[in-house]
Image (spheres, grey):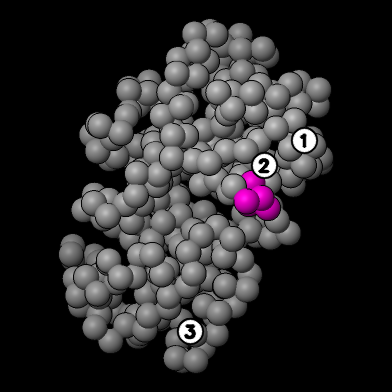
Amino acid sequence: MNDKLKQIVAEASKVFILTDENVAPFWLPETEYWLGCKNAVEIVIKPGEKHKTLQTVQRIWKTLMRHYADRNALLVNLGGGVITDLGGFAASTYKRGIKFINVPTTLLGMVDAAIGGKTGIDFGGAKNQIGTFAEAEEVIIDPFFLETLPTRELLSGLSEMLKYGFVADAKLLETSIENYQDYVLRAGEIKRGIVAQDPYEAGFRKILNFGHTLGHAIESHCLTTDYPLLHGEAVALGMAGALWLSVKQCGLDEQVLKDFEEKLPMLLSEAEISLSEVDIEPILGYLVHDKKNKGEKPQFVLLEAVGKPVWDVEVEPERVKMALQYVIKLSCQ
């Protein structure tokens, strides 16, 4: 534990650790031990995106109040992106903000969700509709946590790493299940660098949403079915759609799309996908609620070339529909 982290913990009036039922048996005792917080208050919630709700946040707030947490309390968010998003939001709003640290235990959390100062919860069936910009005091990245991570969760994280390859550093397009550990730190560096230039997503930071416009809509829709997708799986499909649109609208070399088509089966190999033409209209319905919209018009991040993203791109509704048809056909192969 570094000196900064020791000081944060030592100065806290009380320490709370938020985690979920999947992570707690593996990492909660160990985390309490290395933080030196054997008297920490444990908050263990049910796992999964469907619990990233205001109801869960209320439970966290009530626990903080029940244990008389003051403005000098510390919340440790131990888990994947759901936990860091949810815990960050709860901490940033309780008593107008208490300190929190993120300890991501998933690959996706380490390279994306736990970094960058965005918090949020899902609302009204749509992704991350309610949230704040709030920086964690510290983000602890330790690949040791990945030893217990299921393959499906690793593959979900790979999709976010490939995103950095498309928008910033082509080297990350070489990421695979065999070599991902070589690129974890680089992925985090890329996100931190982009966030530092545009912390409140006024412009340049929007490139981090590559693949997320369609991806979030697909993810939200699939959460209402018997075949929910992990965030990275939905983003993988969203990136396929964004690359297709980039070829049609921004002159992207079609070979980039073809190369990704070859990677996609690997990224989705652990997922159960049951999408068809009847899913298109519901998915388009979720696009209306995308946070990047201007009015009801979705704004896409597309590519002119690898490493040359453009943002706030409006796409005609019929072309968006065609992109979804392409994605659904691809997912069935």
Point out which mark residue 64 bears. 3
User: From the viewer's perspective, is the residue at label 3 or at label 2 nearer?
Assistant: 2
Tell me the kind of residue under disc 3. Leu
Q: Quadrant of the C terminus?
A: top right
- For label 2, the residue is 217
Point out the tag, 3 or 2, that comes first from the N-terminus: 3
Q: Quadrant of the N terminus?
A: bottom left
Question: Quick check: 146 above or below 44?
Answer: above
Res. 327 in view: no
- 318 vs 268, left or right, is right
* Quarter location, residue 248: top right
Question: Gap in Å between the C-alphas at discs 2 and 1?
Answer: 15 Å
- For label 1, the residue is 278
Tell me the kind of residue under disc 1. Val
Question: Gap in Å between the C-alphas at discs 3 and 2?
Answer: 33 Å
Tell me the kind of residue under disc 2. Ala
Res. 265 in view: yes
User: From the viewer's perspective, is the residue at label 3 or at label 1 nearer?
Assistant: 1
Determine the secondary structure under disc 1.
helix
Span highlighted in magenta in the image? 222-226
Kindly identify the residue that appears in the image at 70 percent across and 56 percent down: 125
* Quarter location, residue 26: bottom left
Question: Gap in Å between the C-alphas at discs 3 and 1?
Answer: 44 Å
Disc 1 residue crowd, few under 14, some 14–19, many 20+, Cα 10 Å: few
- 136 vs 95, left or right, is left
Determine the secondary structure under disc 3.
helix
Kindly identify the residue that appears in the image at 34 percent across and 49 percent down: 150
